[in-house]
Image: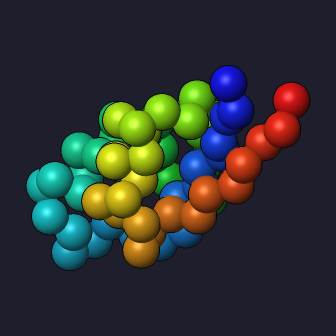
Amino acid sequence: MSKIKVTLKKSLIGGTESMRRNVESLGLKKINSCAIHNDTPAIRGMIHVVRHLVSVEEINE
């Protein structure tokens, strides 16, 4: 299964509660913090909600 690296690039100031919860559930806390996840539809859905705040890279192992 492929993995993806998610990095928080912008602040959550002014964001909705849904955005804050999604960023927290992705394991991101501060700007430039990274988390590695399996590429699943659930993770892709969380990323879709905050796509303007994060950057996503695919990791090939």
Give the percent coordinates (x, y) of residue 16: 14, 64
Direction right: furthest residue: 61
Direction left: furthest residue: 17
Q: How is the image coloured?
A: rainbow
Give the percent coordinates (x, y) of residue 14: 20, 75
Side of 14 where 53 appears, left or right: right
Side of 47 where 49 appears, left or right: left
Residue at 78 percent across and 42 percent down: it is: 59
Q: How many marks?
A: 0
Judge whether 56 appears above or below 58 on screen: below
Side of 52 where 61 appears, left or right: right
Side of 55 where 17 appears, left or right: left
Q: Is residue 31 visible?
A: no
Residue at 66 percent across and 45 percent down: it is: 5
Direction top: furthest residue: 1
- Which quadrant of the view contains residue 24? top left
Q: Which quarter of the figure is the N terminus placed in?
A: top right
| Closest to the observer, 15 or 40 | 40
Give the percent coordinates (x, y) of residue 47: 41, 53
Residue at 42 percent across and 74 percent down: it is: 52
| Closest to the observer, 48 or 23 | 48
Residue at 65 percent across and 42 percent down: it is: 4
Q: Is residue 32 visible?
A: yes
- Which quadrant of the view contains residue 61? top right
Judge whether 9 appears above or below 60 on screen: below
